[in-house]
């Protein structure tokens, strides 16, 4: 179920003083992505500014996404938290609303020990919804080791990992250790999708796919068709944009790129702030090559 290109959705906000949810814009963005061939969508991840959404907004965005998608592709809802009870609430809500799976980041700041991590993920997986682990040490301050991920993969509802460690050796070890499991390894770094596919991974949860969904999908589909040279050419064609998506903290660049493209975006919520003028000009220049 969870293979291919899954855009990590931005959350559009209204251009008002309270920057409320722009659900009409969210639906329009989702329609654009599905029309361009994405294999699934991920609301309420880091790219969706989940850290600044209220409980009610979080649940509303997931529900609106499920309604807009209407069963055409899988919806993997971000339901992570550094508070297990809070993550459990989000996960149960996503399950009740009909999400196909949930994406759960490793608890940040707390830095739990191994047994705590196992209990955290097990409690969420026991809800009954398929769980994708999200390993992103740059945000959580803690790396999930391959042997720990392999141990968690034995749970029937823990079905994959979004690997954003940036360590290709580690990703290879995870794939090696879970080859006998029904377990998906997805790249969490856009530029590493093709190398991860080559190692036996099955796709990516990607930021760049918000802006150039068809080109990101083309990398995946060319690889699956054994057109490795074509996949590589498309990878290098998109490489400048992939880098531009991370010239500042995600989702600052992608949200401004979406606005430049006429997509629903709206303001960022503090403590995130806009790009500098120089960085915005750099982003606009890169985008001009894809128009």
Image: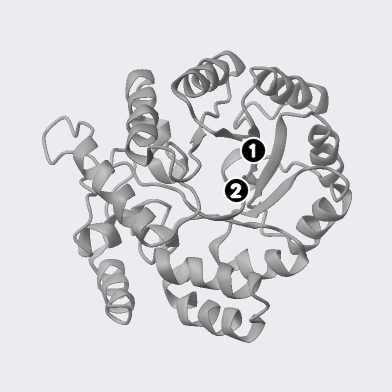
With respect to residue 198, does 91 lie above or below? above
**Residue 10 seen in render:** yes
Point 69% across, 65% down: residue: 197
Q: Are marks 1 and 2 in contact (CB under 8 Å)?
A: no
Point 85% across, 34% down: residue: 151
Q: Percent position (x, y) of residue 188?
A: 59, 53
Residue 245 relative to residue 5: left or right? left
Q: Which residue is mark 2?
A: 138
Q: Percent position (x, y) of residue 98?
A: 47, 26
Check disc 2 and report its element: helix, strand or loop.
helix
Residue that extends furthest to the left in the rendered view of this protein = 16
Check disc 1 and report its element: helix, strand or loop.
strand
Quarter-of-image position of residue 247? bottom left
Mark positioned earlier in the residue sequence (1 or 2): 1
Q: Nearer the viewer, mark 1 or mark 2?
A: 1
Crowd band around label 2 with a 10 angstrom C-alpha radius: few (<14), some (14–19), many (20+): few
What numbered label is drawn on residue 132?
Answer: 1
Quarter-of-image position of residue 23? top left
Q: Percent position (x, y) of residue 191?
A: 56, 68
Q: From the viewer's side, name the closer residue of 90 and 243.
A: 90
Q: Quadrant of the C terminus?
A: bottom left
């Amino acid at each position: 179920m969870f293979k291919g290109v899954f855009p990590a959705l931005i959350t559009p906000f209204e251009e008002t003083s309270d920057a409320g949810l722009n659900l009409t814009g969210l639906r329009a963005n989702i329609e654009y992505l599905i029309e361009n061939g994405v294999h699934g969508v991920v609301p309420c991840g880091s790219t969706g500014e989940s850290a600044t959404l209220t409980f009610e907004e979080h649940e509303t965005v997931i529900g609106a996404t499920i309604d807009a998608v209407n069963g055409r592709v899988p919806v993997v809802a971000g339901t992570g938290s550094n508070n297990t009870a809070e993550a459990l609430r989000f996960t149960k809500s996503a399950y009740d609303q009909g999400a196909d799976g949930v994406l759960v980041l490793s608890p940040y700041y707390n830095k739990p020990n191994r047994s705590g991590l196992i209990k955290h993920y097990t409690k969420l997986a026991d809800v009954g919804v398929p769980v994708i682990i999200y390993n992103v040490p740059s945000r959580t301050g803690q790396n999930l080791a391959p042997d720990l991920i392999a141990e968690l993969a034995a749970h029937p509802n823990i079905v994959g990992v979004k690997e954003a460690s940036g360590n290709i050796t580690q990703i290879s070890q995870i794939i090696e250790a879970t080859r006998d499991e029904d377990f998906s390894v997805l790249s969490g770094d856009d530029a590493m999708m093709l190398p991860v596919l080559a190692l036996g991974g099955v796709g990516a949860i990607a930021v760049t796919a918000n802006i150039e969904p068809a080109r990101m999908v083309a990398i995946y589909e060319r690889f699956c068709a054994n057109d490795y040279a074509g996949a590589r050419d498309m990878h290098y064609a998109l490489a400048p944009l992939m880098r531009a998506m991370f010239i500042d903290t995600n989702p600052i660049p992608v949200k401004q790129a979406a606005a430049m493209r006429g997509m629903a975006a709206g303001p960022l919520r503090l403590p995130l702030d806009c790009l500098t003028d120089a960085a915005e000009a750099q982003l606009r220049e890169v985008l001009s090559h894809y128009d």
